Amino acid sequence: MPNVLLTAGHVLFKHDLGGAPLKVEVWSPVSRKWTVVKNYTWTADWQNKTGDYRARDFGAIKTPVTSAGFFELLVSNDPWLLASEFTVAGYAGDKQKLSVEPVLVSATSTVTATYPDRLKHMVDTTPGESGGPLFSSVPNKGIRAVGIHNYGDAAGNFATRITAEVANEIQLWINNL
């Protein structure tokens, strides 16, 4: 849906800053302005730090404006994921200080490991790109998102994997936001 943004749960619910945000604003490259949004959500596992909450670090924002473009989601198999190149696009924090308007950046690399609920990837990311899509061109289908970039640490970069369960949860959010 062109007016629902997927993101990392920690972009919306910040454990270290007291939890839920007082205000959420999104940048629209179409209108070239910031807009306050009122409809957003994140997973209960992320909020409550239950289960493998880092794999459940995702959320959604409904915006009042249509985006410039959007990705359909793809539930994909391990062999294809390990044989393809992927891109992460986002607003890297180190680039934002150089511009009045947010600067979208992207980088491309490979997925190096697959897990039932997340993907380990080698795409070069920096703080601020959390929540960006992990996407690729799929033969006969076009561009599809296979993950939501969450974080990087000494072990590598990770994304929540788009599984049937994740896609269904996102669809419920779209219907209810």
Image (spheres, rainbow, N blue to C red):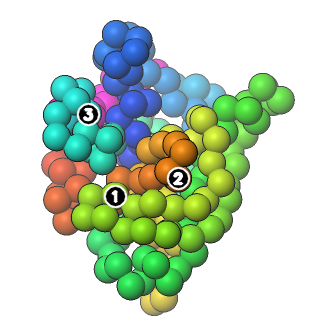
- In the displayed orientation, state which residue is furthest to the bottom: 140
Q: Secondary structure at mark 3?
A: helix
- The number of callouts visible is 3
Q: Secondary structure at mark 1?
A: strand
Q: Amino acid at mark 2?
A: Gly
State the image coordinates of residue 121 (x, y, percent, origin top left): 51, 61
Marks 3 and 2: in contact by CB < 8 Å?
Answer: no
Q: Earlier in the sequence, mark 2 or mark 3?
A: 3
Q: Residues within 10 Å of mark 1 (few under 14, many from 20)?
A: many
Q: Position of residue 3 (x, y in %)?
A: 40, 45
Look at the image and tell me in which quarter the N terminus lies. Answer: bottom left
How far apart in space, not on screen, are marks 1 and 2 (Cα)? 12 Å
Quarter of the image for residue 106 reads bottom right
Q: How many C-alpha atoms fall within 10 Å of the one at disc 3: few (<14), some, or many (≥20)?
A: many
What span is colored magenta in the figure? 36-44
Q: Which circle, 2 or 3, is nearer the viewer?
A: 2
Q: Nearer the viewer, residue 118 or 166?
A: 118
Front position in the image: 63 or 141? 141
Q: Earlier in the sequence, mark 1 or mark 2?
A: 1
The label shown at residue 156 is: 2
Per the rendering, the mark at residue 46 is 3
Q: Quadrant of the C terminus?
A: top left
Q: Of the residues tagged 1 and 2, which is closer to the observer?
A: 2
Q: Is residue 53 magenta?
A: no
Predominant secondary structure, magenta span: strand
Name the mark on residue 118. Answer: 1
